[in-house]
Image: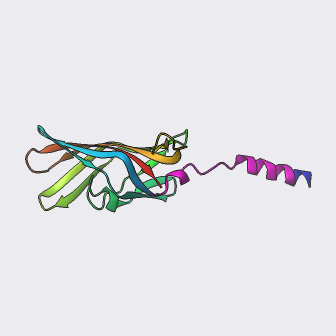
Amino acid sequence: MWRFTFLAVLLVGCTGSDPVAPFIGTWRYVLASQVITRCGGDQTAADLVGSVTYTREGDAIHPNPASLSSFAGDGCLLDLRVTSDDTIADLVPRDDCTFVTTAGAVNVSFSTYRLTRASVYLTPTDPGQDGLALDLDALVTGVQSPDQCTVTASATMLP
């Protein structure tokens, strides 16, 4: 009997928390969440509003393709993986997406898509809430003149 108890204690000690779970769900943009697009000498900035949903497939985190349409168009499936310290999810491997617009085919090459677990303070007296920070960098090619644009997004999100 003592062998079974010892084995049960070992198995319980080996099970850890799920590192993917804190990233999954629907997150709304808060604070100064923005996307900046630079094409040639022109730059436009827009507030990120609404929400983004992250789902899981095994150990992978996927942004809902519909929520990526402002960055990458419909049907772009990105694969984020949690790093060893369980607080960051990075795009692995770096990914390219091609989609068709009314202007023709567009390619989006992501150099960064990172989610970081963070405490979010909405006011100076806020005790802090569990949230996510988003950092995104991408190169968009195939758009009309000029032929390439960069897209940078920085966002703070709460469930």
Residue 12, x across and y down, in percent: 75, 51
Q: In which quadrant of the rendered image does the N terminus lie?
A: bottom right
Provide the residue span drawn in magenta.
5-26
Residue 69, x across and y down, in percent: 28, 58
Camera-side residue of 62 and 157: 157
Whether 154 is among the magenta residues is no
Residue drawn at x 45%, y 45% is: 122
Residue drawn at x 28%, y 61% is: 74
Which of the 4 image quadrants contains residue 99?
bottom left
The residue lying furthest to the right in this view is 1
Judged left or right of residue 154, residue 128 is right
The answer to whether 67 is drawn above or below residue 13 in the figure is below
Q: Is residue 91 visible?
A: no
Q: Is residue 37 visible?
A: yes
**How many numbered discs, if any?**
0
Camera-side residue of 78 and 39: 39
